[in-house]
Amino acid sequence: MLAEVVAEKIKKELSSFFGTVLASFILYGSYADGKESKYSDTDSLVVVKQRSGDWRARRDCEIALRKILYRSVGQVSPRIIGTDIISATLRNFNPLLLNILKRGIPLPADGTFATVKEEFQRMVECKINRQSRRNPVRARKKPAQKLS
């Protein structure tokens, strides 16, 4: 499968680029859905074990990584996030992260992605419970009978 070959190449390049700071990377988008074509880019979320820094530093790192990966894999769109801000991103219900949680494939599976998924599930359950306490289900009245 094309996705497996691409994922292995990306994993090798990321390990070389980040070293021990790499926590995990998650493949998402068309490759994760199995709908890739020869024109597809490879969407990936790179999770690092360090502070994410400001957005400019992250962007510069993403650009450098994109150039390196282009030589060996082709068009790759990496997003970098630190383990320090994943929780904050989840609390804001970031749509990109929610999509990645739903459809993403973690490579390597070091437990970071599973932990984030569990935390998100707890957040959703907590929010549902909080809403149900605020708006208790009221007893429904019987529908009015039709007059014949």
Image (spheres, rainbow, N blue to C red):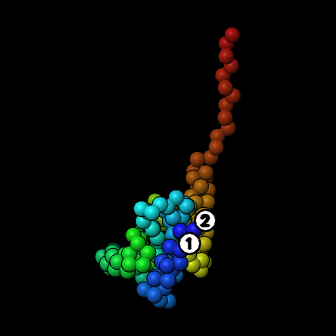
The amino acid type of the residue labelled 2 equals Arg
Can you give x and y, in whole percent of width and height, for residue 114 in the image? 60, 72
* Rendering coords of residue 133 (x, y %): 61, 52
Relative to residue 54, is residue 122 depicted above or below?
above
Specify the quadrant of the image occupied by residue 56: bottom left
Give the camera-side residue of 26 and 32. Answer: 32
Which-is-in-front pick, marks 1 and 2? 1
Which residue appears at 41% of the width and 72% of the height? 74
User: Cα distance, mark 1 to mark 2?
Assistant: 31 Å
Residue in view at x 50 percent, y 89 percent? 20
The answer to whether any part of residue 8 appears in the image is yes
Which residue, given by chain and number where applicable, does mark 2 sit on?
122
**Mark 1 secondary-structure assignment:** helix
How would you rate the neighbour count of disc 1 (Cα within 10 Å): few for under 14, some for 14-19, many for 20 or more? few
- The image's mark for residue 4 is 1
The quarter of the picture where the C terminus appears is top right
